[in-house]
Image (cartoon, rainbow, N blue to C red):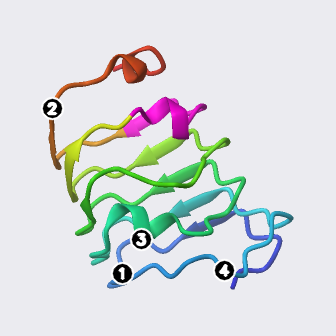
Amino acid sequence: LFAPSVKSLDASHNNFTHVKPFKKYKSSHSLRTFDLSSNLISQEFATLFVDKPRNIEEINLSNNLISGPIQTSEQFDFLRRLIVGSNKLSGTLPNLPSKFPNLVDLNLSSNMITGSINGGLTNHLIL
């Protein structure tokens, strides 16, 4: 899909509606930042990260129509920034540090998340 040397993909402010799995992505590729903010993506959160790039450091999916709880079976060892504000995310916050151990910037603003901020989250991030 992408040339191995691409480090940053900014496809923000378009009319994309769907993100396909990164099936052909190889760990040797250099993609580190992925910005699809301000599009029309209307998938569930968990489906966005099937076979995602292993070394991704920043994901910006803000200002879309992404729904569902913040759940993923994927591990994000290198992710430092997750920006998913202004979507339709719902449910309670899972134990984010278990899936995102190096996260330092998290934007969940303007969603429909309920419940409380769990202790695991507040031990790892400055809120």
Give the crowd class for mark 4: few <14, some 14-19, many >=20 residues within 10 Å.
few
Query: Could you tell which of marks 2 and 4 lies nearer the N-terminus?
Result: 4
Is 23 on the left or on the right of 18, as rendered? right
Distance from label 1 to label 2 (Cα)?
33 Å
Q: Secondary structure at mark 2?
A: loop
Is 69 on the left or on the right of 25, as rendered? left
Question: Which quadrant would residue 32 be assigned to in this image?
Answer: bottom right
Residue stretch in magenta: 95-106
* Residue that label 2 marks: 115
| Numbered tag placed on residue 23 in the rendering | 4
Q: Amino acid at mark 1?
A: Asn
* Residue that label 3 marks: 12
- Is residue 127 located in the magenta-colored stretch of the structure? no
Is 103 on the left or on the right of 106, as rendered? right
Q: Secondary structure at mark 4?
A: loop
Q: Secondary structure at mark 1?
A: loop
